[in-house]
Image (cartoon, helix red, strand yellow):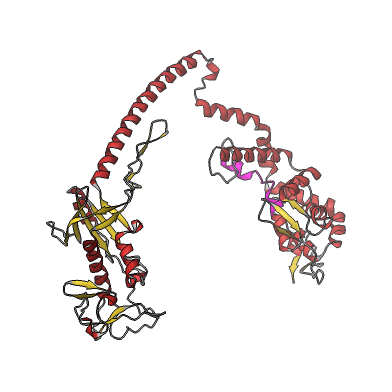
């Protein structure tokens, strides 16, 4: 069971959680077997109308103000909660019977079961389109109108005839046509339209012209529950399409057979070495492994934790004087950013603190506020200026090129891995961009640059703080362990 939508919420519209005294506003009253608006009957208690829902006496409030629309109110508080919806439902049926016309909706099919136009793919994956069923929305004159005539196990709101034939009309105020009822109507080959009034603004029923338009003329609020003539036309179009696709698939099969024979002939002419028993992939795998064999042979040794620890100690000793000189020349915030480094920052063949200090000097300190640079420029400058591990860099470039090729082919690949390398090898190859990107992030945290949203990797040099630099960290002089990153103490 569906719920009552917001426009027909039974809350007091003023927001008061207490129910309105005298009942909820009712847009239409029942009198002498017809449904009336407040402006169509005598005012006040003399209207002679009863509630369409609970059949209690109503009073016509025909005066219109900025805050209120003409409406009916219960003479006594009956707690009625159906008068509004029942009145809308009955008035809609009455309008159709009185005017003897209705705008029927366009038939658009079903996106899943009956796409209009129908479409199908052939064996090559090419999409083929059938003939579209063109049944636009249009106004139809009605005759032989009957209200709630029983049709066996169900009773439509309105039964009428138009120029095509019998037309069943359902008015939705709170409940849509159920699946069982819809299936029964479709199985019987009957035409049925549902007019959806559940989303009307709450003031619309009090505006007679607007309500009449919503019931009779608004093509957007109605849909076909069953339209046999459109379904039959769609079925004919689908059959034509299926025949076209079947003929095309036969051509494809013949062409593939010819191509297979030609391929077999070529294969038999090829030399034995080109017919690798392990298949094309295995052959390419061996070729690529051979091309990178020397670099892969050094990979495990180059990236061993023992070697990394040893060369970092050597880098620190050789760069100690230069690093000390540069650290003395920068504010504490920059020292904090440069004394930390990504775990792969050793790959550039120099003390990570040194290349970070020099990169800051080149791209930030020697630039003016507002100058821009790109992270790719920083990475390229670091590689050119120092001594990156060439074997590791070649392997990284191979990974990077493999990802770019996969992305061009339409694969959403993000990780850096090359199918020729083993999982362990792919994991051990360091990313030559990550240490630079990590350093740039720390410069942004130090508020000397800001990263721009576009283009990707673009950065802008910021002016120094108005109050000058304030120390945010210092190096503990009592720490003589040799590990500068561990001697950073936050203030």
Q: How many marks?
A: 0
Q: Where residue 119 appears, x then y in whole percent?
A: 36, 38
**Relative to 480, residue 167 above or below:** above
User: Can residue 39 be seen by looking at this rendering?
Assistant: yes
Instruction: Looking at the picture, tell me which residue is in the foreground, 178 or 326.
Output: 178
Instruction: Looking at the picture, tell me which residue is in the foreground, 128 or 273.
Output: 128
User: Which residue corresponds to the image point at 60% horizontal and 27% vertical from the top-left?
Assistant: 287
Q: Main secondary structure of the magenta part?
A: helix
| Image side of residue 2 versus residue 436, left or right | left
Instruction: Looking at the picture, tell me which residue is in the foreground, 153 or 430.
Output: 153
Quarter of the picture containing the C terminus is bottom right
| Image side of residue 374 versus residue 1, left or right | right
Q: Where residue 395 appears, x then y in whole percent?
A: 66, 38
Q: Is residue 235 magenta?
A: no
Instruction: Looking at the picture, tell me which residue is in the foreground, 204 or 62.
Output: 62
**Relative to 80, residue 284 above or below:** above
Quarter of the picture containing the N terminus is bottom left
User: Within the image, what quadrant is residue 21 found in?
Assistant: bottom left
Please identify the residue farthest to the top as the structure is shown: 269
Q: Is residue 423 magenta?
A: yes
| Image side of residue 78 versus residue 202, left or right | left
Range of residues picked out in magenta: 422-437
| Image side of residue 188 versus residue 430, left or right | left
User: Which residue corresponds to the image point at 28% horizontal and 66% vertical from the top-left?
Assistant: 173
């Amino acid at each position: 069971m569906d719920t009552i939508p917001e426009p027909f919420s039974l809350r007091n519209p003023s927001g008061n959680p207490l129910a309105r005294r005298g009942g909820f506003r009712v847009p239409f009253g029942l009198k002498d077997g017809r449904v009336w608006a407040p402006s169509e009957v005598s005012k006040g208690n003399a209207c002679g109308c009863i509630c369409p829902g609970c059949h209690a006496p109503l009073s016509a409030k025909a005066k219109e103000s900025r805050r209120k629309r003409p409406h009916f109110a219960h003479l006594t508080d009956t707690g009625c909660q159906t008068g509004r919806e029942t009145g809308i439902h009955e008035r809609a049926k009455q309008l159709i019977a009185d005017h003897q016309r209705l705008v029927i909706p366009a038939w658009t099919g079903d996106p899943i079961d009956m796409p209009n136009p129908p479409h199908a793919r052939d064996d090559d994956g090419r999409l083929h389109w059938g003939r579209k069923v063109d049944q636009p929305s249009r106004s139809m004159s009605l005759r032989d109108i009957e209200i709630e005539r029983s049709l066996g196990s169900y009773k439509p709101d309105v039964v009428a005839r138009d120029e095509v034939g019998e037309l069943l009309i359902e008015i939705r105020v709170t409940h849509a046509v159920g699946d069982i009822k819809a299936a029964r109507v479709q199985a019987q080959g009957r035409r049925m339209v549902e007019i959806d009034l559940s989303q009307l603004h709450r003031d619309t029923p009090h505006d007679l012209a607007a309500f009449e338009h919503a019931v009779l003329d608004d093509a957007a609020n109605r849909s076909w529950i069953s339209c046999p003539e459109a379904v039959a036309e769609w079925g004919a179009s689908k059959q034509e399409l299926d025949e076209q696709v079947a003929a095309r698939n036969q051509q494809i099969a013949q062409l593939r057979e010819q191509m297979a024979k030609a391929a077999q002939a070529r294969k038999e002419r090829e030399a034995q070495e080109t017919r690798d028993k392990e298949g094309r992939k295995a052959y390419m795998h061996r070729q690529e492994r051979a091309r990178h064999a020397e670099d892969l042979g050094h990979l495990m040794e180059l990236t061993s934790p023992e070697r990394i620890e040893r060369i970092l100690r050597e880098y620190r000793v050789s760069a100690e004087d230069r690093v000390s000189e540069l650290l003395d020349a920068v504010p504490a915030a920059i020292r904090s950013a440069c004394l930390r480094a990504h775990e792969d920052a050793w790959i550039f063949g120099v003390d990570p603190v040194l290349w970070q200090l020099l990169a800051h000097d080149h791209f930030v300190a020697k630039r003016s506020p507002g100058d821009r640079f790109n992270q790719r420029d920083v990475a390229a400058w670091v590689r050119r200026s120092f001594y990156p591990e060439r074997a590791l860099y070649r392997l990284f470039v191979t990974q990077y090129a493999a990802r770019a090729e996969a992305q061009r082919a339409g694969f959403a690949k993000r990780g850096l891995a090359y199918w020729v390398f083993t999982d362990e090898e792919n994991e051990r190859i360091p990313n030559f961009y990550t240490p630079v990107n990590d350093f740039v992030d720390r410069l942004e945290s130090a508020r000397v640059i800001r990263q721009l949203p576009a283009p990707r990797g673009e950065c802008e040099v910021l002016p120094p703080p108005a109050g000058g630099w304030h120390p945010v960290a210092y190096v503990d002089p009592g720490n003589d362990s040799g590990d500068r990153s561990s001697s950073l103490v936050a203030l």
